Image (cartoon, rainbow, N blue to C red):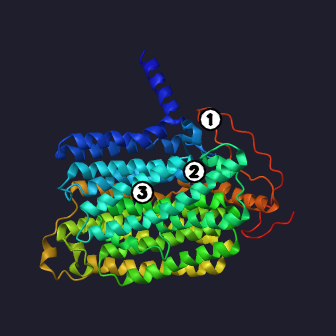
Amino acid sequence: MLTAIVGGLAHNLSYFYHSHLVLTTLVFFPLLGVAFCLALRPEQARWVALGTSLAEFGLSLPLFWTFRVGDPGFQNVTKAAWIRDWGIAYAVGVDGISLLLILLTTFLTPLAILSTWEYVTRRTRAYYAMMLLLLTGMVGVFVALDMFLFYVFWEIMLVPMYFIIGVWGHERRIYAAMKFILYTALGSLLMLVAIVGMFWLTMQRSGAPSFAYLDWLRVTVPSGLQLWLFLAFALAFAIKVPLVPFHTWLPDAHVEAPTAGSVILAGVLLKMGVYGFLRFAIPFFPNVALDARVAMAFLVLALLGILYAAWVAAVQPDAKKLIAYTSVAHLGFIMVGLFAMTSQSVQGGILQSVNHGISTGALFILAGFLYERRHTREIAAFGGLAAVVPLLSASLVIVALSSIGLPSLNGFVGEFLILLGAFRTHPWVTVLATLGVVFAAYYLLPMVRRIVWNPLDKEENRTLRDLSRRELAIMLPLVAMIVLLGVYPRPFLDRIGPSADAFVTVIRADAWAIEKGQPRVAVSPPARAARPRAQPAQPRVRPEEPPRGSQPGERPAR
């Protein structure tokens, strides 16, 4: 009897994790926590938020093992009509590009909630409700396969972050929140215009309204509109990344946000800009993205971000603002990987998105710990902390070295793949980007030296307490992931690799097919029925293919 019960439970769990149910649960389960946070007493709300976020992470973690390695297409797919007359559906799915970003989101959220456990003392119920609502929006963005649904989740996530900065932030929180919402709202409006344009083009060509992502991939946009629609999407995502010169909202938002807001902003929200380029801007308009002039323009902006942000970070007296500028530099590396358009560089860009979320999130958490102890973010206010708080100091050293890209820690793997792949197509860009690795040491190591090893000449620092059990519970998983991703990244690359390979191959084939006036190739193999023993879909027959070795922007020989 016990065997039958265990067997039935295992069968049900297998179905759950090979169907859309796991994704639907991950999207909407936090809303249950939102309702409880608002209904219960303030002291209970934080426990509900922590429990909900931990349950969310526990539900998401088995996806890493149930994901079919080697399958570049979407898995756990479902599609149900929502607003039938307009072709709007509830459609979700996950592939190698979105899988790790979902896990990063669910991993960081409970740690972020714990990081402000003692800091948030007013409007507690609303704060934790906003954190869980933000979680729903973030997961929804990464799983949506309907453009209307994607836009809804994209807008949902902006609202709680605005309130988290504006209500629970520091002295200039209103200014930072307004700047954040104005920049991101501008990007959202540009993207909305592009979405409406793509919808009407899809309806004109298919004869039926559709917001389905896979339907839009098959649409050939008229040459006169391609650049404008691409720029509308690209500017929306460039603001979110952010690329220079659209970055000025980010330092203010980071500095004024509470620690949890900074962690989620750096760890997840910035990656949505990268994800937008990977999932929408480049696949919808491949011949524009692969145009040599467009690609070089974005590579130059990425280089400006790497070099400019490094030098600005080096002179910052505020630890949090320095870390904020490091985000601009690291996201520049990721964008180099995307627009270099090789399999290695794209894999490195996706992996580095995860690495940056962990390392920079940990830096913001440590900055928050220091602020709670001294109520200042000034680097000069510290010094000699290694003798007083050895655990906090050791954590800061490890995390800073990972952010620099020290071999055997996570930052090295992603940056190395980006530079290795980018050198094949843009060697001079790669050489200049490599300077960013040197500059990273130039701005991070002096900060660590001044905080950890400078003379202990301030009396206030002699009585600081070391990491508590709560703070150790936050830092140990982060440090463990930093080491794991640096020493053994293969399981993560195995899941990223097939989707990244298919992305690069099909983007090039699509660009060539559009140029030749032939039907487009889907950006990934058809979404397969999400069952434990699903049969692989038959390969799509392509009318003609470009040679596999063709370079971006180069017209392949027939």
Q: Kindly check if marks 3 and 1 are in contact, taking CB atoms under 8 A apart as contact.
A: no
Rendering coords of residue 30 (x, y %): 36, 43
Q: Viewer-nearest of labels 1 and 2?
A: 1
Q: Alpha carbon of mark 1 to alpha carbon of mark 2: how far?
A: 16 Å
From the top left corner, tell me how far across and down residue 549 is, in percent: 77, 65
> Can the viewer see residue 440?
yes
Question: The residue under label 2 is which amino acid type?
Answer: Gly
Q: How crowded is mark 3: few (under 14 residues within 10 Å), some or many (20 or more)?
A: some
Could you tell me which quadrant the N terminus lies in?
top left
Mark linked to residue 96: 2
Relative to 282, is 13 on the left or the right?
left
Residue 494 percent coordinates (x, y): 59, 52
Q: Is 160 rendered above or below residue 236?
A: above
Label 1 sits on a secondary structure element that is: loop
Q: Label for residue 529? A: 1
Question: Between disc 3 and disc 1, whose residue precedes?
Answer: 3
The tag on residue 481 is: 3
Distance from the alpha carbon under mark 2 to that under mark 3: 19 Å
